[in-house]
C-alpha cells in the first residue's frame, strides 16, 4: 500500500508540474494586463519539443547528451522522496534529507558541465552564475528544513514534516518564517524573479535559460520538464509545512494541496509582477538575507522555547 | 614470535621481501627493461601484501585476534591493518601508472633508477609505519618515508620550482619529526616503555597527557595538512612527479590521520574540548581549503588544496568521534570515526585518480595551467570519463563513494544532536551548514576543473594525445573502486565498523553504522543508473524517428568564434574569488587602454596562500635575519669550532652536574 501511494505521489508530481507553471504564467499575465497563454500551454510546449529534431553544438561532447537524462532521472528521484499529502513517499529512510539535497546537487553538477560543454561564453556565464548562487542557496535549505530536523530529531523528510505540530505560538511563527525562507530558496533554485528572469530575451541577463541555450528537441524537452518538476518539488516543500498532521483525512489533504498550490502560484505571480530582476552582483546579498532570516528565526525560537 | 612460520606470516613477510627485492632489478642496464622488471616485481610484492592484508582477521568473518610477530616490534591490529589496506590498495594502481609515466622520462634520457629506489623505499617505509608497534621503529620508518619522499621529489632537480617546493616539504617534515620526538619521549617518560601496546594514559592524570595530545595534533597535523599547517602541501604537490603526488596526497598525508587516531588510542577517552578543538580546526581547513582551490590555475596545486579540504572533512569525523568519546556515547563515536576512516579510504582512491588523470594530461600538453587546456574530451574520451568519475566522487555527490562517507558524517551530526540535546542541535546545525557549504564549493570547483580541462574546444592544440594501456588500467581500477564503494557500501562500512568496534569503543559494541539502511542506497543508485540507461535507449529511438544533427553553437550571429573566447577558469570562479578576496590574498590586474585605437589589453590573476605569505615567509625572513647577526661566529679556522664545542660541552656538563 505504501509503495502504491508512493508511486501515485510521484505520478502526481510528474503530471501536475507543467500545470503549476501554466497557472503561474496565466496569473502573471492577468496581473500585468495581458490575456496570456492558456493554462495548459506548458503541456503543449512539451509536446512540441518532444517531436522536434535534436540538435547539438559541434563542440559538444557526450556530456551534452548525457546530462538531460541524468537531470530528469535525478529530479524524479528527488520527487520520490517528497511526501505528498499524508502519504509516505516512495523513498523514505533515516537520513534521506541529505540524499535529497545531494541528489539536487548531482543534477546541478551535470547541468553546469553540460553548459560548459558547449564552449561558448554565454553558457559559461550562466554556468558560473549557477555555481555561485547555488553555493549561497545551499545553507538556506539546511537552516530551514534542516533546523526542523534538528529540533524534532528526525532525519527523514516524511518524519520531519510529520513532527510539525502547530500547537504553540512560537513554533507557529517559526514555521511561518521558515516557509518564507523556503520561498526565497525556491525562487532562486527554480530561476524565477527576482533572481532570474525566465522570460528575458537577452542572453547576458539569464541564468538557467542561458545554460540550455544550445539545446533543442528531446534534450530541451527533458530540461524543461525537469525545471517544471523542480519548481513543483519546491512548491510541495513549501505546502507541506501547513498540513494538519494530527488529523489525517484525504479530503483535508487534497484541499490543502490544491489550495496551497493555488496560493503559491499566486504568490509567485505577484512577486514576479511587482519586482524586477536584481543585479547579478546583488543576488548573493539576497540569498544571505534569506540565510540570515533562517538563523535569526532559529535563534529566536531556541531562546523563547 | 610464537608462530613465525605459519602461512599468514610467511605470506606477509615475503610480500615485504619481494617488494624490497625489486630494487635489485634496477641493475639491469637498459632503463626500459629495468623499469619493467623492477615495477613488475614491486607489483607482485604489493599484490601479495594486499592478499595477506585481506586474508587477515579484519576482512574475514573470523574473530579478531592480535597478530604479533618479530618480538612484538610489529603488530597488526585492526587500525593498522585498515591503513595497510589503504596503502596497498592505492600503491598498486599507482605503480601500474609508473610503467607509462616513467617511460616518458626514459625517452628524455633521464635516469629514473634512483627515483624507483626511493619510490620502493617510500612504499615499504609507509607500510612499516602502520604496522610498527614500537616508537623507535615508528620514528625511523617515518623519517625514511619523509626523506625518500623528498629525494623522489627531486626527479627534475634542475628546475628552480622543484628545489623550492621540495624544500617546503623537507622543512615541514623536519619540524614535524622534532615534535614527534618530544611526544614519544613524553610517552616513554610516562609509561616507561617504547611499545605502543603499553601506552595507556588518561587525561585526568595531569598536564602531560594534554601536552601529548596537542603535540600529536600539531606534529601529525603538519603531515595531514590541517589548515594553519597546510602551507607545504600546495608547494610540494605540484612539483612532485605525478606518481609521487598521487601517493603523497592519497596515502602519505593520511599517515597524519593515522598518527592522530593512534595517539587517540593511547589516551582515550579524551575530554570534550579536544573534540571541539579538532572540529573547529577541521571546518576551517575544509572551507578555506576548497576556497583556495577554487582560485588556482595549476591543476596539481588545486588538487593539493582539495586534499586540505578532505583532510578537514576527515577531521570533522574525528572531532565528532572525540565528542562521542568524551560523553561516552558509543553510537556517536562509531559514526564519527567511521565517517573519518571511510573518508580516508575514499579520499585515497579518488585523489590518486585525479592526480594520475592530471598527470596524463600534463604528459601530453606539457603544462599544468588549466587555462591552456580544453577540449581533451574530443581527443581522449575515456580519460575524460574516468576523471569525471573522480570529480563527482570528490565533490561528495551521489552515487559515488565520496557521498557515502559524507553521509556518515552528517548522520554523526544528527546523532550527536539527538543524544546530547541542550545547545548541541544548534551547534551541530552550524557544522552541517558548513559541510553543505563545502560541498557546494567543491561542486563549483570541480565543475570548473572538468569543464575547463576537458570540455569545449582546444585552447592549446596538440598533434597527438598519447595514452597508454597502463593509464587506463590504473585510472580504471580507481574509478571502479569509486563506483563499487558508492553503489555497494555495505561491506566497506562493515570493515570500518569492525575496526572501530574492536579498537575505539570502550563500552558495548554499537551498531549505529550498520543500522543505516545501506541497501536503500544500492537500490536507489541502481534505479537511477537503470533509469538513465532506459531513457538513453528510448531517446536513441526517438532521435531516429525525429532526427538528430549537430550545428555550430549560438554566437549571436558572430561566426568567427575561436577557442580563446571560451569562458576561462578565472572568469568561472571570479565572482566567488571576489567575495573571498580578503582571506585569499587574491590579486587581479586588468589593464585596458582607453585610446581611440585600443591597444591590446592585459589581464592577470593569481592567489597567494595567506599562511604562507603572511606567516611562514615573514617568520622565515626574520629567522634568517637573526642568523645573519651571528654570522661573525662562522670562521674558516677549524680551531674556533673545536673551541665552541668545548664551551658547549662545559656548559652541558655544568648543568648536568648542578641538576
Image: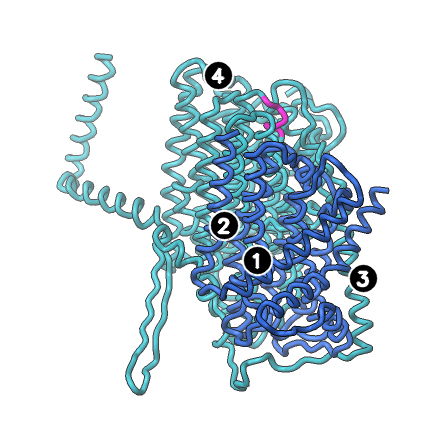
Q: Are marks 1 and 3 on the same chain?
A: no
Q: Which residues are magenta?
A: B329-334
Q: Position of residue B578 (x, y in %)?
A: 39, 59
Q: Secondary structure at mark 1?
A: helix
Answer whether labels 1 and 4 touch (C-beta < 8 Å).
no
Give the numbered dot on residue B202.
Answer: 4
Give the numbered dot on residue A187.
Answer: 1
Chain in cyan colour? B
Q: Main secondary structure of the magenta part?
A: helix
Q: Secondary structure at mark 4?
A: loop
Label 2, label 1: how far apart the Cα atoms are: 11 Å
Mark 3, residue position:
B534
* Residue B130 appearing in the image: yes
Q: Are marks 1 and 4 on the same chain?
A: no
Q: Position of residue B550 (x, y in %)?
A: 68, 80
Note whether B476 is above or below B493 in the view shown. below
Amino acid at each position: 500500500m505504501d509503495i502504491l501511494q508512493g508511486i501515485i505521489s510521484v505520478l502526481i508530481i510528474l503530471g501536475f508540474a507543467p500545470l503549476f507553471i501554466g497557472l503561474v504564467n496565466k496569473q502573471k499575465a492577468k496581473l500585468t494586463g495581458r490575456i496570456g497563454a492558456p493554462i495548459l500551454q506548458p503541456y503543449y510546449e512539451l509536446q512540441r519539443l518532444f517531436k522536434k529534431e535534436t540538435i547539438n553544438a559541434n563542440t559538444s561532447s557526450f556530456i551534452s547528451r548525457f546530462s538531460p537524462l541524468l537531470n530528469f532521472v535525478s529530479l524524479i528521484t528527488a520527487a520520490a522522496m517528497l511526501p505528498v499529502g499524508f502519504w509516505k513517499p516512495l523513498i523514505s529512510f533515516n537520513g534521506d534529507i541529505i540524499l535529497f539535497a545531494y541528489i539536487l546537487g548531482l543534477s546541478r553538477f551535470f547541468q553546469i558541465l553540460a553548459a560548459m560543454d558547449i564552449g561558448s561564453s554565454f553558457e559559461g556565464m550562466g554556468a558560473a552564475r549557477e555555481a555561485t548562487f547555488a553555493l549561497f542557496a545551499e545553507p538556506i535549505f539546511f537552516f530551514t528544513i534542516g533546523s526542523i530536523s534538528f529540533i524534532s530529531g528526525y532525519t527523514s523528510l516524511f518524519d520531519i514534516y510529520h513532527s510539525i505540530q502547530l500547537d504553540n505560538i512560537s513554533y507557529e511563527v517559526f514555521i511561518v518564517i521558515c516557509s518564507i525562507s523556503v520561498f526565497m530558496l525556491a525562487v532562486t533554485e527554480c530561476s524565477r524573479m527576482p533572481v532570474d528572469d525566465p522570460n528575458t530575451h537577452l542572453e547576458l541577463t539569464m541564468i538557467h535559460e542561458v545554460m540550455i541555450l544550445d539545446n533543442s528537441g528531446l534534450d530541451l524537452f527533458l530540461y524543461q520538464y525537469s525545471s517544471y518538476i523542480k519548481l513543483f518539488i519546491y512548491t510541495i516543500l513549501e505546502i507541506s509545512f501547513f498540513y494538519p498532521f494530527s488529523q489525517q483525512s484525504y479530503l483535508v489533504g487534497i484541499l490543502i494541496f490544491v489550495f496551497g498550490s493555488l496560493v503559491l502560484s499566486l504568490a509567485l505571480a505577484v512577486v514576479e509582477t511587482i519586482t524586477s530582476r536584481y543585479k547579478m552582483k546583488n543576488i548573493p546579498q539576497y540569498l544571505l538575507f534569506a540565510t540570515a532570516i533562517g538563523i535569526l528565526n532559529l535563534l529566536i525560537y531556541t531562546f523563547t522555547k | 614470535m610464537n608462530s613465525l612460520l605459519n602461512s599468514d606470516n610467511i605470506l606477509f613477510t615475503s610480500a615485504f621481501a619481494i617488494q624490497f627485492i625489486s630494487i635489485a632489478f634496477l641493475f639491469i642496464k637498459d632503463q626500459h627493461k629495468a623499469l619493467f622488471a623492477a615495477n613488475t616485481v614491486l607489483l607482485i610484492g604489493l599484490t601479495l601484501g594486499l592478499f595477506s592484508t585481506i586474508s587477515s582477521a579484519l576482512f574475514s568473518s573470523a574473530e579478531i585476534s592480535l597478530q604479533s610477530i618479530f618480538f612484538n616490534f610489529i603488530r597488526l591490529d585492526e587500525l593498522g591493518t585498515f591503513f595497510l589496506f589503504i596503502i596497498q590498495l592505492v600503491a598498486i594502481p599507482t605503480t601500474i601508472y609508473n610503467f607509462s609515466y616513467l617511460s616518458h622520462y626514459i625517452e628524455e634520457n633521464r635516469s629514473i633508477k634512483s627515483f624507483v629506489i626511493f619510490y620502493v623505499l617510500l612504499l615499504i617505509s609507509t607500510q612499516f609505519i602502520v604496522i610498527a608497534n614500537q616508537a623507535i621503529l615508528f620514528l625511523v620508518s617515518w623519517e625514511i618515508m619523509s626523506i625518500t619522499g623528498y629525494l623522489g621529489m627531486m626527479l627534475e632537480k634542475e628546475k628552480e620550482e622543484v628545489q623550492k617546493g621540495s624544500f617546503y616539504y623537507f622543512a615541514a617534515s623536519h619540524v614535524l619529526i622534532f615534535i614527534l620526538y618530544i611526544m614519544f619521549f613524553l610517552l616513554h617518560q610516562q609509561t616507561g616503555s617504547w611499545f605502543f601496546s603499553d601506552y595507556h594514559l588518561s587525561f585526568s592524570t595531569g598536564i602531560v597527557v594534554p601536552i601529548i595530545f596537542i603535540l600529536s595534533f600539531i606534529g601529525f597535523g603538519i603531515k595531514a595538512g590541517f589548515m594553519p599547517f597546510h602551507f607545504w602541501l600546495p608547494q610540494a604537490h605540484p612539483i612532485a612527479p605525478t606518481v609521487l603526488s598521487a601517493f603523497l596526497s592519497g596515502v602519505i598525508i593520511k599517515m597524519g590521520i593515522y598518527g592522530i587516531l593512534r595517539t587517540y588510542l593511547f589516551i582515550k577517552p579524551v575530554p570534550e574540548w579536544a573534540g571541539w578543538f579538532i572540529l573547529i580546526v577541521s571546518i576551517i581547513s575544509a572551507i578555506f581549503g576548497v576556497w583556495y582551490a577554487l582560485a588556482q590555475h595549476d591543476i596539481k596545486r588545486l588538487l593539493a588544496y582539495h586534499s586540505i579540504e578532505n583532510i578537514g572533512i576527515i577531521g570533522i569525523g574525528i572531532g565528532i568521534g572525540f565528542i562521542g568519546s568524551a560523553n561516552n556515547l558509543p553510537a556517536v563515536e562509531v559514526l564519527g570515526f567511521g565517517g573519518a576512516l571511510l573518508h580516508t579510504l575514499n579520499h585515497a582512491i579518488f585523489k590518486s585518480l585525479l592526480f594520475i588523470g592530471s598527470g596524463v594530461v600534463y604528459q601530453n600538453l606539457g603544462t599544468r595551467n588549466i587555462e591552456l587546456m580544453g577540449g581533451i574530451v574530443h581527443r581522449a574520451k575515456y580519460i575524460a570519463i574516468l576523471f569525471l568519475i573522480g570529480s563527482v566522487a570528490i565533490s561528495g555527490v551521489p552515487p559515488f563513494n565520496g557521498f557515502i562517507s559524507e553521509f556518515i558524517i552528517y548522520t554523526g551530526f544528527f546523532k550527536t544532536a539527538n543524544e546530547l540535546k541542550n545547545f548541541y542541535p544548534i551547534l551541530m546545525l552550524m557544522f552541517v551548514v558548513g559541510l553543505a557549504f563545502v560541498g557546494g564549493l567543491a561542486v563549483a570547483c570541480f565543475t570548473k576543473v572538468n569543464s575547463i580541462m576537458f570540455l569545449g574546444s582546444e585552447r592549446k592544440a596538440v598533434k597527438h594525445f598519447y595514452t597508454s594501456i597502463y593509464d587506463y588500467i590504473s585510472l580504471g581500477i580507481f574509478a571502479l573502486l569509486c563506483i563499487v564503494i558508492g553503489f555497494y557500501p555495505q561491506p566497506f562500512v562493515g570493515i570500518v565498523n569492525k575496526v572501530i568496534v574492536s579498537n575505539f569503543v570502550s563500552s558495548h559494541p554499537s551498531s549505529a553504522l550498520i543500522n543505516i539502511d545501506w541497501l536503500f542506497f544500492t537500490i536507489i543508485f541502481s534505479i537511477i543508473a537503470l533509469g538513465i540507461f532506459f531513457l538513453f535507449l528510448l531517446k536513441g529511438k526517438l532521435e531516429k524517428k525525429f532526427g538528430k544533427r549537430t550545428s555550430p553553437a549560438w554566437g549571436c550571429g558572430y561566426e568567427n568564434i575561436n577557442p580563446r573566447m571560451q569562458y576561462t577558469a578565472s572568469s568561472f570562479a571570479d565572482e566567488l574569488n571576489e567575495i573571498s578576496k580578503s582571506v585569499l590574498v587574491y590579486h587581479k590586474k586588468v589593464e585596458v587602454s582607453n585610446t581611440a585605437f585600443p591597444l591590446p589589453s592585459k589581464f592577470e590573476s593569481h592567489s597567494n596562500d595567506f599562511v604562507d605569505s603572511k606567516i611562514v615567509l615573514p617568520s622565515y625572513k626574520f629567522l634568517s635575519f637573526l642568523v645573519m647577526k651571528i654570522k661573525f661566529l662562522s670562521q674558516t679556522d677549524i680551531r674556533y669550532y673545536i673551541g665552541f664545542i668545548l664551551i658547549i660541552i662545559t656548559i652541558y656538563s655544568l648543568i648536568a652536574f648542578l641538576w
